[in-house]
Amino acid sequence: MKKIIWVTSYPKSGNTWMRYLLSNYFYNHNGVFDPKIIKHIDRLELPKNMMMFNDNGKISINKISQYWIPAQKKLQNKEIKFIKNHSANLTLDNNNFTNEEQSLAIIQVVRDPRDIVVSGLNFWNIDNYDEMIEKICCDEFFTIYQKENPHKIEVIGTWKVNFLSWSGSLKSVPKIIIRYEDMIKNTEDQLFRVLKFLSNLMNVKIDKKKILFSVKNSNFLKLSEAESKGEFTENVQKRGKFFREGKCGQYKEELNTNQIKKIENSFYKEMLFLGYI
């Protein structure tokens, strides 16, 4: 039985960057920069005719949950598959988002939630930082989906719920946590860590030249330029610029003391565990 390698994260945490690194390493056989190479690692695709709305015409997470596992089972006859994911690993109406039977490994990419607030505000065109902070801290789940591709819907949850739902579940499934900040400091080292992790689970030859090639062709400036030329096609809803700055610590200049404290108080244990405070 073939299984899924989840590339999971809260939105705006470096998931796309990790997917480019992996896609260039495993799937780029032409040796040239290709902004569309990322299509090799896509979201979980639910049935296109799924019932996703309740009687009031609003998205029903409970209805969506019944399709999670069946959609994953359809992948089992294919090769080991990387799947991009922002959904929390939830259980709703006794429907698990995923389980040990479907999952080979978890690559969890994390980022300082204070910087996620800054990045998310610009991307989602939210009015102010207080509203963005409320979005990542409130207890209600929210969803992300494209009108063009509603069957790729994701149920996010709060930053805390999302992080813990993956780091603290599926005990028998191997996991690795990669910090966005460490990817910026030494991209080669972090890609090597992921490949070393995967080599214990699948046939992976670690090639230094391929690592360098993948890092070079997943460069932030290259991807930002490709987006400006219309060659990055994932931001189909034309929200804010996807590849905006890609820096660490932007929150220090953007958020006030009370806003920073609210985030830190909400996620203190998790941020301490990850070395953010």
Image: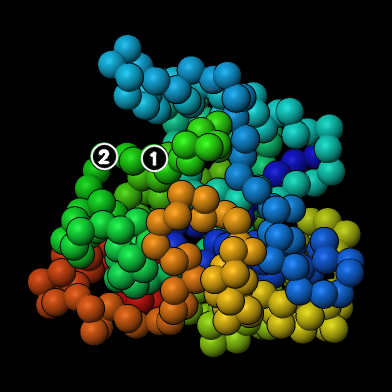
Mark 1 → mark 2, Cα distance in angstroms: 10 Å
Q: Is residue 242 left or right of residue 223?
A: left
In the picture, measured across the screen, residue 42 lies left or right of residue 59, that is right
Is residue 28 visible in this depiction of the protein? yes
Q: Is residue 168 above or below residue 198?
A: above
Three-letter amino acid code at disc 1? Answer: Thr
Residue 212 vertical position relative to residue 1 in the rendered view, above or below: below
User: Residue 140: which disc?
Assistant: 2
Query: Is there any visible trace of residue 167 in the rendered image?
Result: no
Q: Nearer the viewer, mark 1 or mark 2?
A: 1
> Which of the two residues, 234 or 85, is positioned nearer the viewer here?
234
Q: Residue at x 25, y 51 (%)?
A: 135
Quarter where residue 251 is shown: bottom left
Q: Secondary structure at mark 1?
A: strand
Q: Nearer the viewer, residue 205 or 244?
A: 244
Q: Residues within 10 Å of mark 2 (few under 14, many from 20)?
A: few
Q: Residue furthest front?
A: 229
Q: Looking at the picture, how far across and down is residue 154, in whole percent?
A: 47, 40
Task: Give the color scheme: rainbow, by chain, secondary structure or one colour.
Answer: rainbow
Q: Return the mark for residue 143.
A: 1
Amino acid type of the residue tagged 2 in the rendering: Glu
Looking at this rendering, what residue extends furthest in the left direction?
258
Horizontal side of residue 251 vs 75, given as left or right: left
Q: Which residue is situated farthest in the top direction here? A: 55
Give the vertical position of 56 relative to 28 (above or below). above
* Residue 165: % across, % down: 44, 47
For the N terminus, which image quadrant?
top right
Q: Considering depth in this image, is 112 or 58 the residue closer to the camera?
A: 58
Describe residue 117's horizontal placement relative to residue 173 as left or right.
left
Q: Residue at x 64, y 64 (%)?
A: 231
Mark 2 falls on what kind of element? Answer: loop
